[in-house]
């Protein structure tokens, strides 16, 4: 018989503990661990490139977000057809020249804590949150009506009936209430008190309520999934909401899948490795699959037991924009260097930059020819998309140089571009570091603009840092970013209307932010506002198309943003996942997630 000394026993004990710790650490990063622990629970493993920035719908500024899983609106936009369908509201009735709309809620609706969802919650959401001037929610612009930007008047008729009174006819109204891109209903019983108290900064307590430091199990939702846990930089876990209202044709409660594991994986290359190894069930649901992965994954479909879905052109848009604001901070310091501001606000400069970017090369090199060169701010799937008659900026560096010189710029002996006062033309270009296509695109744009003498300092940043710069501090020169799209152009009002919270290229003072000085609206922005308001008011489809045609032409002439190359809607999905209805129309490939099933047999 062997005997261990006290020292040997301690060493053995320590080695055993260390091994256990290592095993737990490794398991903590592996979604398959959850499957082992809950063998009888169906689950879906997904990925996102960044942590959520909030658990409060009114504060959302990023996509994708948790609200895709956890919140719903009165209506729903079908991701296959684009049609508006009943959702939390089972029916609605227009009257009085389309200025009065009465919604009937489904009976028996409940919040995830078991409390009834009633007309009080609808009134609270629209009247106390969205229409609240102290809450800078990006849902505002989609529901403001007319030149005076009035909100609908909302009135409870009974527990299941809500009346909206509009100041004038509003064609996008039903889509403005739809899941997932419209106003989603929030719980009055859980949040009402936060609108009656203020924090130490003087802002409503609501604005800091349900941040990502909140216990996820305390978040009250109405969608198919509730939050179960959140580990920053690693994962969110959702579980099915036992109080969710939807049922299938046989009366079985939805959703079918019990648990969603949303892995936070910043690197898309790492996501690809995790998908190929079987750790992820879907890749490309929130942002289309990178085109260079397409041929690789197509070859592996049979062996890997998955299929690559091709939904055609994606409905989102991708663009580069300059910081056009002439405003100053509270201390009087301009947000943009006045020298640079003069370049950026010169139309000839923006047009020259547009001609200098080789978008066909971007498509061929980065999208493998599968992308769509963009010339419009409206999605190609929209009936309002203008196919002909738009100004285009095909690659022409010679023309770019001529435009610059005609505007007073000149070149020195080293072929460096100088402005009217002899200043070297140089600016910083930002994008999010966790989107490798945009990073590669930024590198090519830097190279393209160097050919016309412009020095670009290209700096990829963490996505949430980028959003903070463009939405709060205003500390940037130019950036590349995407925006979700769809059938109805008014759904992008938050980007295009001059008061919108996503109108980053000339961001108006926003509620809850420090005051700024000297913000000005340009003539182009005034005209875009007018066209948007007129198109929303117009119920005649032919006239609406004409107004949106004028909007598209104006954007391409004045270039507040420079459109680049649009993604193709590509998504890879395990064969064990069924019920998918994938197209390039919705911003989220899993728009019908409550109907999805997984089969592990």
Image (cartoon, rainbow, N blue to C red):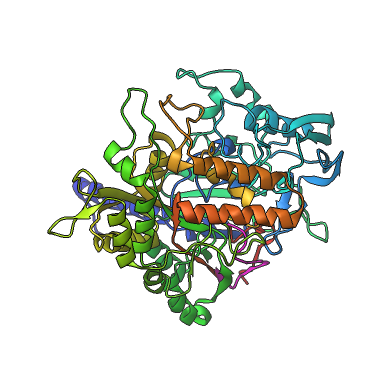
Total number of numbered labels?
Answer: 0
Q: Main secondary structure of the magenta part?
A: loop
Task: Pick whichever, 380 or 243, lies toward us.
Answer: 380
| Horizontal and vertical percent position of residue 404 | 30, 55
Q: Which residues are magenta?
A: 573-587
| Horizontal and vertical percent position of residue 455 | 23, 54
| Horizontal and vertical percent position of residue 575 | 59, 73
Locate the N terminus by quadrant: bottom left
Looking at the image, can residue 135 be seen? Answer: yes
Q: Residue furthest front?
A: 406
Residue 583 included in the magenta stretch of the image: yes
Task: Pick whichever, 192 or 542, lies toward us.
Answer: 542
Up-down relation of residue 279 to residue 266 (above or below): below
| Horizontal and vertical percent position of residue 190 | 65, 29
Looking at the image, can residue 20 be seen? Answer: no
| Residue found 63% across the figure and 72% down from its top | 601
Locate residue 223 relative to residue 433 in the image: left or right. right
Up-down relation of residue 161 to residue 179 (above or below): above
| Residue found 38% across the figure and 59% down from its top | 354
Up-down relation of residue 326 to residue 258 (above or below): above
Residue 297 included in the magenta stretch of the image: no
Task: Pick whichever, 501 or 551, lies toward us.
Answer: 551
Locate residue 413 relative to residue 91 in the image: left or right. left
Task: Pick whichever, 14 or 295, lies toward us.
Answer: 295
| Image-quadrant location for residue 365 | bottom left
Locate residue 302 relative to residue 319 in the image: left or right. right
């Amino acid at each position: 018989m062997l005997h261990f000394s006290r020292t040997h026993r301690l060493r053995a004990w320590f080695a055993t503990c260390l091994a256990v710790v290592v095993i737990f650490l490794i398991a903590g990063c592996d979604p398959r661990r959850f499957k082992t622990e809950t063998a009888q629970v169906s689950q879906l493993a997904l990925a996102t490139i960044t942590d959520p920035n909030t658990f409060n719908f009114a504060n959302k500024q990023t996509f994708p977000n948790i609200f895709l899983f956890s919140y719903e609106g009165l209506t729903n936009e079908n991701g296959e057809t684009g049609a508006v369908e009943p959702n939390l509201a089972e029916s609605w009735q227009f009257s009085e020249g389309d200025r009065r709309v009465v919604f009937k809620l489904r009976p028996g609706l409940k919040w995830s804590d078991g409390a009834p969802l009633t007309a009080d919650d609808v009134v609270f959401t629209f009247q106390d949150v969205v229409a609240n001037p102290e809450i800078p929610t990006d849902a505002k612009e989609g529901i403001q009506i007319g030149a005076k930007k009035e909100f609908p008047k909302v009135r409870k008729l009974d527990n299941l009936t809500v009346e909206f009174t509009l100041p004038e006819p509003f064609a996008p109204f039903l889509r403005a209430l739809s899941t997932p891109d419209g106003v989603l209903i929030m719980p009055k019983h859980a949040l009402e008190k936060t609108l009656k108290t203020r924090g130490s900064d003087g802002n409503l307590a609501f604005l800091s309520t349900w941040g990502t430091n909140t216990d996820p199990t305390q978040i009250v939702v109405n969608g198919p999934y509730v939050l179960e846990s959140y580990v920053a930089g690693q994962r969110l876990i959702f579980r099915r909401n036992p109080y969710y209202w939807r049922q299938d044709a046989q009366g079985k409660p939805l959703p079918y899948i019990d648990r969603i594991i949303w892995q936070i994986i910043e690197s898309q290359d790492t996501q690809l490795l995790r998908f190929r190894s079987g750790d992820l069930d879907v890749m490309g649901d929130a942002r289309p699959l990178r085109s260079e992965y397409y041929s690789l994954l197509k070859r592996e479909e049979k062996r890997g037991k998955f299929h690559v879905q091709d939904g055609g052109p994606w409905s989102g848009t991708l663009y580069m924009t300059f910081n056009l604001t002439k405003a100053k901070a509270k201390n009087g310091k301009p947000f943009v260097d006045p020298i640079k501001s003069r370049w950026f606000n010169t139309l000839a400069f923006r047009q020259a930059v547009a001609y200098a970017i080789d978008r066909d090369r971007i498509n061929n090199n980065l999208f493998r020819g599968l992308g769509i060169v963009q010339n419009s701010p409206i999605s190609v799937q929209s009936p309002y998309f203008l196919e002909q008659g738009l100004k285009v900026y095909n690659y022409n560096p010679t023309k770019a140089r001529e435009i610059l010189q005609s505007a007073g710029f000149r070149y020195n002996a080293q072929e460096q571009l100088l402005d009217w006062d002899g200043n070297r033309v140089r600016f910083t270009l930002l994008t999010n570091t966790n989107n490798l296509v945009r990073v590669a695109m930024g590198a090519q744009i830097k190279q393209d603009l160097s050919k016309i003498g412009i020095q670009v300092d290209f700096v990829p940043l963490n996505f949430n840092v980028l959003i903070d710069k463009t939405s709060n501090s205003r500390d940037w020169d130019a950036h590349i970013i995407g925006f979700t799209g769809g059938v109805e152009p008014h759904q992008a009002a938050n980007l295009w209307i001059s008061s919108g919270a996503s109108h980053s290229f000339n961001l108006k003072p926003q509620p809850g932010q420090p005051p700024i000085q000297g913000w000005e609206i340009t003539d182009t922005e005034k005209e875009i506002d007018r066209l948007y308001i007129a198109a929303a008011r117009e119920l005649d489809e032919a006239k609406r198309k004409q107004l949106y045609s004028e909007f598209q032409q104006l954007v391409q002439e004045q270039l507040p943003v420079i459109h680049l190359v649009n993604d193709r809607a590509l998504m890879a999905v395990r064969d064990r996942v069924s019920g998918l209805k994938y197209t390039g129309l919705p911003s989220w490939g899993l728009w019908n997630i409550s109907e999805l099933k997984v089969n592990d047999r």
